[in-house]
């Protein structure tokens, strides 16, 4: 029998986790032959709610769910884990300054980085979802020097899925027919959704998105701003942030990291190796190709237009500033 994979989800009593846990426990992410031990971390105050989530998970009667460990103790949560899905973060409250929000999150992700460093398996793979996701991943990576930096990623797959869905809707195909959409940079409104290398398959024929859409001003205008502002649009309509689609994107991110991407690429926030002139070490969303052994590489050699360069640099500037502010709060 295969050893259970120990998967930690933080923010486990929250709304994204509620949409996520079933898919992970059912086998949709790590495979239908892979038993799972689910470790669920939330804060003390949420333990009652978390018990309800545990009851529901048990009531799903899932054959792959080996055990469930609900806890508010970081030392229990991070012990020997194979995968960390870091969803829990300090939300922005009314009247809260950006700097205060950053400070609260630096504290959380510094502690979690230290726990990863001392308690988790050295092969642990980390995806940070809690915002500001790129910078939180940067902080966790910084405080976990014994874990390979490339094991730290942040979620930009929701942005990629949103972009692919916009193109699919415009062309009248499904999102599956749209490949190689890239999200560059920060998971924020400065991100650059780029379809200049993307393809779409219509009636069995694959062409560039640009040739099929035949509307550059839309591709360089409303398309980009719609994707950049999609999170805010969902909040405005639902009075809550994206949860179902965020959970689906986490599953896509981790499933591809586990099984590989074969003939296409996907976007993940990963530590920059200096590719495309992006500051080394910054957690920046790039197109990556993933092998079945979980190793990935940033797709090289894509031609970058002046239009793209300007947008890639703008989102880099925001990330550098966020990172500098975050590291400053560590010293305060
Ligand atoms: P919820 O407020 O529903 O849940 C968050 C949970 O995290 C709460 O149960 C809270 O008690 C817990 N928590 C807070 N601090 C914690 C800590 N130190 N350790 C463990 N648990 C902790 O938020 P939800 O809608 O689930 O969103 C979670 C995070 O995802 C937010 O930061 C949100 O901004 C971010 N998002 C990121 C996305 C991405 O693509 N990267 C998209 C969706 C979402 O906006």
Image: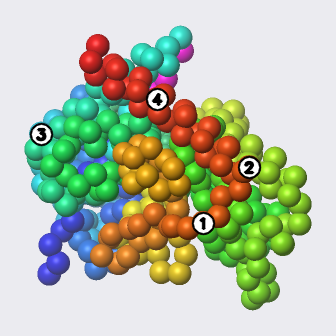
Q: Give the extent of the magenta segment.
A: 90-94
Local secondary structure at mark 1: loop
Closer to the observer: label 1 or label 3? 1
Looking at marks 1 and 3 on the same chain, the residue that comes earlier in the sequence is marked by: 3
For mark 4, what is the residue?
A: 322
Residue 93 painted magenta = yes
- The alpha-carbon separation of the residues under discs 1 and 3 comes to 43 Å
Looking at marks 2 and 1 on the same chain, the residue that comes earlier in the sequence is marked by: 1
Q: Residue 293, how many percent across, how many down?
A: 30, 76
192 or 248, which lies in front? 192
- The alpha-carbon separation of the residues under discs 4 and 3 comes to 28 Å
Within the displayed image, which quadrant is ligand 1 positioned in? top left
For mark 1, what is the residue?
A: 302
> Quick check: 132 left or right of 51?
right
110 or 8, which lies in front? 110
Q: Residue 38, how many percent across, how many down?
A: 24, 56
- The alpha-carbon separation of the residues under discs 4 and 1 comes to 27 Å
- Image: 301 above or below 124: below
For mark 3, what is the residue?
A: 75
Whether residue 196 is visible here, answered yes or no, is yes
The quadrant the C terminus occupies is top left
Type of colouring: rainbow
For mark 2, what is the residue?
A: 307
Q: How many marks?
A: 4
Crowd rating for badge 2 (residues with CA inside 10 Å; few <14, some 14–19, many 20+): few
CB at disc 2 and ligand 1 closer than 8 Å? no
């Amino acid at each position: 029998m295969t050893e259970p994979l120990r998967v930690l989800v933080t923010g486990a009593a929250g709304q994204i986790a509620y949409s996520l846990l079933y898919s992970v426990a059912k086998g949709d992410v790590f495979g239908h032959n892979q038993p799972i031990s689910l470790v669920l971390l939330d804060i003390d105050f949420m333990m009652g709610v978390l018990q309800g989530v545990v009851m529901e998970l048990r009531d799903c009667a899932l054959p792959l769910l080996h055990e469930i460990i609900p806890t508010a103790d970081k030392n229990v949560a991070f012990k020997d884990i194979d995968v960390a899905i870091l969803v829990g973060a300090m939300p922005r409250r009314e009247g809260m300054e950006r700097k205060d929000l950053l400070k609260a999150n630096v504290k959380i992700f510094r502690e979690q980085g230290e726990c990863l460093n001392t308690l988790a398996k050295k092969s642990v793979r980390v995806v940070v979802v809690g915002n500001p996701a790129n910078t939180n991943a940067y902080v966790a990576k910084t405080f976990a020097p014994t874990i390979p930096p490339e094991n730290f990623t942040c979620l930009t797959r929701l942005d990629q899925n949103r972009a692919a869905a916009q193109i699919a809707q415009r062309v009248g195909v499904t999102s599956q027919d749209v490949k190689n959409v890239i999200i560059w940079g920060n998971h924020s409104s400065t991100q650059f959704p780029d379809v200049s290398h993307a393809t779409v398959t219509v009636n069995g024929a694959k062409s560039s998105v640009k040739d099929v859409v035949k509307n550059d001003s839309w591709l360089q205008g409303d398309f980009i701003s719609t994707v950049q502002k999609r999170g805010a649009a969902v909040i405005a309509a639902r009075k809550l942030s994206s949860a179902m689609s965020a959970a689906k994107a986490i599953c896509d991110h981790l499933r591809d990291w586990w099984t590989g991407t074969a003939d296409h690429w996907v976007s993940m926030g990963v530590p920059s190796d200096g590719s495309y002139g992006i500051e080394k070490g910054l957690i920046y969303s790039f197109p990556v190709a993933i092998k079945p052994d979980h190793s990935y590489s940033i797709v090289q050699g894509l031609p970058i237009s002046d239009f793209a360069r300007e947008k890639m640099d703008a989102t880099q500037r925001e990330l550098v500033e966020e990172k500098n502010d975050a590291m400053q709060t560590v010293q305060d």
